[in-house]
Image (tube, rainbow, N blue to C red):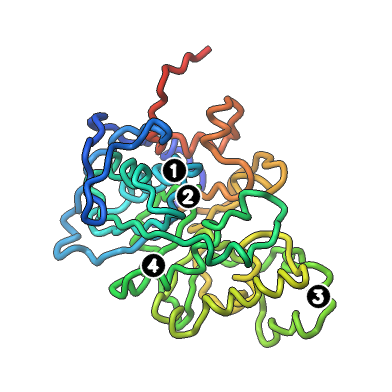
Amino acid sequence: MARCAIAVVAALLVLLGGGGNAAARIRVEYSGMVIRRPSSSIPSFREAPAFRNGEECAGGGGRVDVAMTLDANYLRGTMAGVLSILQHTACPESVSFHFLAAGMDADLAAAVRATFPYLDLRVYRFDPSRVRGRISRSIRHALDQPLNYARIYLADTLPPDVRRVIYLDSDVVVVDDIRALASVDLGGHVVGAPEYCHANFTNYFTDAFWSDPELNGTFAGRRPCYFNTGVMVMDVGKWRAGGYTRRVERWMEVQKQTRIYHLGSLPPFLLVLAGDIQAVDHRWNQHGLGGDNVKGRCRGLHPGPISLLHWSGKGKPWIRLDARRPCAVDYLWAPYDLFRPSSPVLEE
């Protein structure tokens, strides 16, 4: 399973992003209703090939539940992420996708169905009003969107038969078998994620927070470390039983009264869970490939093996590629891009 970063990069550069029949499905089934073909306002995508289970998946291979958000601005990234998961797992038919959308947008659901007609998926409406009054302005507008906070409400949204879920942001590609991440031992913790204890944890909170013993006392008895909430394995039952949604919400309410952090949905997660998660191998989140949250400068890969690439930060690979100003790492995302431009692109 282990491989060096150079070998992974070399392999990724020759991967094809999937082809197959480009004809879009005119009718797709969605929540018992027939919905229309995606409108012209939704990007057009090539149909992905059908991915089938290997021989080792006899009996279903054990279902893996993956949750992502569904948003028109990030739809291209979502499509690439889904394709990468299916392409690299031995049991693609055993992966179920759960999409949280800010509205029951038939066009977005139709686009996913048309691109992945064999996909096992469900779409859930996330009510933005649940968080709109709790969101405080952050350093980047995209971080303030209600759908960015939907991960807090996963356990409240998913059906009872989902006991463990992998939450992924829409700017990732998975280059390993997702089953390995799904099967990590959580050691009794509610969340598992790669943990980065070398990061300066104090930077995630304001001086007002660190100067107030009542506030920073929340970390008493814990060794808090940074972790990125764009890649998490969650024990859904433990989250519900422990009332974690409400715990996170309380810190968002504190933020409305006293500014204790500058980012969006990450800090309240850290306040509740930092120092109390199951650390997962760093290979499962090569994060920061989008650069910093302000200028989005290019960044390279971290040393070590890679199972998941994450363009967290301001810069997104599809935007930089379209602008013909890509970073080197963006070429590792490109093979999974199913976007079909409406007009031919002429190369110099």
Per the image, the residue denoted by label 4 is 165
Determine the CA span between mark 3 and mark 4: 33 Å
Q: Which amino acid does label 2 sit on?
A: Ser
Question: Which residue appears at 55% of the width and 78% of the height?
Answer: 246
Question: Which residue appears at 70% of the width and 56% of the height?
Answer: 138
Horizontal and vertical percent position of residue 209: 79, 74
Is 197 placed above or below 48 here?
Answer: below
Q: What residue type is labelled 3?
A: Trp
Secondary structure type for disc 4: strand
**Which quarter of the figure has residue 265?**
bottom right
For label 2, the crowd category at 10 Å Cα-Cα, with few meaning under 14, some 14 to 19 and many 20 or more, is: many
- Mark 3 / mark 1, whichever is N-terminal: 1
Determine the CA span between mark 2 and mark 3: 32 Å
Secondary structure type for disc 1: helix
Q: What is the quadrant of the N terminus in the image?
A: bottom left
Query: Answer yes or no: do the residues labelled 2 and 3 have beta carbons within 8 Å?
Result: no
- Mark 2 / mark 4, whichever is N-terminal: 4
Per the image, the residue denoted by label 1 is 75
Q: What residue type is labelled 1?
A: Leu
Identify the mark at residue 273; answer none if there is no mark.
Answer: none
Per the image, the residue denoted by label 3 is 210
**Which quarter of the figure has residue 188?**
bottom left
Which dot, 4 or 1, sits closer to the camera?
1
